[in-house]
Image: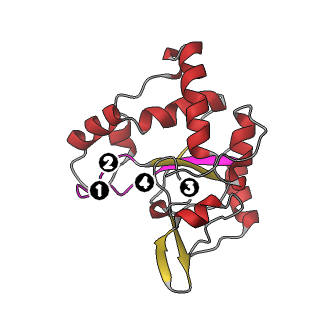
Amino acid sequence: CEAKMVHQFDHRWATYSADGSGDVSSAQKQDPAFSVPPRYWVEAAEVEARLRDKGWERGWLMGWRDICRSTDERTVIASVLPRVGVGHTMPLFMTEQPAERVAMLLANLLSLTLDFAARVKVGGTHLTYGYLKQFPILPPDRYTDADLAFIVPRVLELTYTACDLKPWAADLGYDGEPFPWNP
């Protein structure tokens, strides 16, 4: 999965086909079984070995776009995505925090407040770890139970629109069908 294939709360933003790359249509996103075919393929065993070496056992990943241009509407674009190989322009978050806290991190990263801070802070076209460490990201222990109860279900509904993120939904305590895609 290349970084340009994801967007905010959307791991099915763009795809590749015989004709080249392009956006995934709303009609395709309406089908929870649809998954985006990548341009490059990596052996699943290789992906699993690398994730195992990092100690990552969850059935999903979360990362952000390294490339951020001033012409983009948003500076910070992050998403949860299935357990797949990713390219170098999509750094990953790997944390031992519970999934609910990771959902809060995703919500924090995609907030307008954080994006404003990122817009005025980033001086180039790469959103590196150095920048990320300077952003106003709340520590996991700052969220109350009321915050979790309000935000986590909304993050779940925005992200779990396809069957390939079932492990993410399960980690968030949800065992139902994916939510309908709604642009």
In the rendered image, which residue does mark 2 sit on?
Answer: 75
Circle 3 or circle 4, nearest the eye? 3
Across and down, in percent, residue 83 comes to: 68, 54
Horizontal and vertical percent position of residue 53: 70, 49
Q: Residue at x 50, y 37 (%)?
A: 106
1 and 2 marks in contact (CB < 8 Å): yes
Task: Please tell me which residue lies in front, 112 or 69.
Answer: 112
The residue that disc 4 covers is 65
Residue 82 forms part of the magenta stretch: no
- From the image, tell me which residue sits under label 3: 11
Give the camera-side residue of 133 and 183.
Answer: 183
- Mark 1–mark 4 distance (CA, rounded to whole Å): 12 Å
Question: Is 75 on the left-hand or right-hand side of 171?
Answer: left
Start-end of magenta stretch: 58-76
* Element type where label 3 sits in the image: loop
Q: Earlier in the sequence, mark 4 or mark 2?
A: 4
